[in-house]
Amino acid sequence: MGNRISTIHIALAVAGATMLGLAAAPANAAPGKKTPYWASLSHDEARMRVGPSLDYPSNWVYRRRDLPVKVVQVLGLWRKVQDPDGAQGWMHVRLLSDTPTAIVRSAIAPLHGSPSDGSATLFRAERGVVGRISDCSGGWCAFDVKGRRGYVKASDIWGNIDG
């Protein structure tokens, strides 16, 4: 019995050291992208957790596919993200997408027919509207909200305006 306990303690110590090594390795390895970088939610429901594991409780549940988030830290398959309101927590990588999106932060954001103040306003998006973005340059971004497209001032949105 004494040998069995010793063997179990040694096995647990080795397993613990191995897990620590595995957990520490990805944090130092280049994840392919340099933080911070932009991502968006790829599911209709995504849980933000207080730590990088399913063992940690959720601090937020998001029900907003395409919501932009900023990835500020990488740890294995977990990403520490910041939401548009500044809340931070951990999400599993499978909940995130590279699709460039943004959320309207101004009270009303006019969407124009071309990237110019002088162009026709096609429609207006209210604060909180989420859309997919592309072609950000000169202070404007092409913005697509469920098929309705126009150009929005980059200063009116929060998200992947870096391109």
Image (cartoon, rainbow, N blue to C red):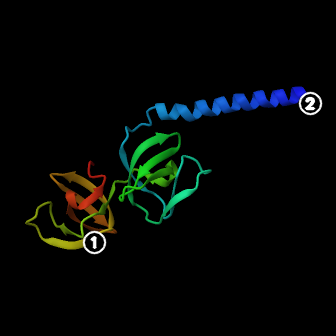
Disc ID at residue 1: 2
Looking at the image, residue 150 sits to the left or right of residue 128; the answer is left
Rendered location of residue 78, percent (x, y): 51, 45
Q: Nearer the viewer, residue 112 or 48?
A: 48
Q: Residue at x 43, y 65 (%)?
A: 64
The residue that disc 1 covers is 126
Task: Using the rendered view, name the quadrant where residue 150 is placed.
Answer: bottom left
Mark 1 or mark 2, which is nearer the start of the sequence? 2
Q: Residue furthest left?
A: 118
Q: Residue furthest right?
A: 1
Vertical arrangement, residue 10 with respect to residue 66, above or below? above
Q: Residue at x 10, y 67 (%)?
A: 119
Vertical arrangement, residue 14 with respect to residue 105, above or below? above
Q: Residue at x 58, y 47 (%)?
A: 53
CA separation in Å, label 2 and label 1:
70 Å
Q: Amino acid at mark 2?
A: Met
Disc ID at residue 162: none
Q: Residue furthest bottom?
A: 123
Vertical arrangement, residue 152 with respect to residue 161, above or below? below
Rendered location of residue 20, percent (x, y): 61, 32
Mark 1 nearby-residue class (10 Å; few <14, some 14–19, many ≥20): some
Q: Amino acid at mark 1?
A: Glu
| Viewer-nearest of discs 2 and 1 | 2
Mark 2 nearby-residue class (10 Å; few <14, some 14–19, many ≥20): few
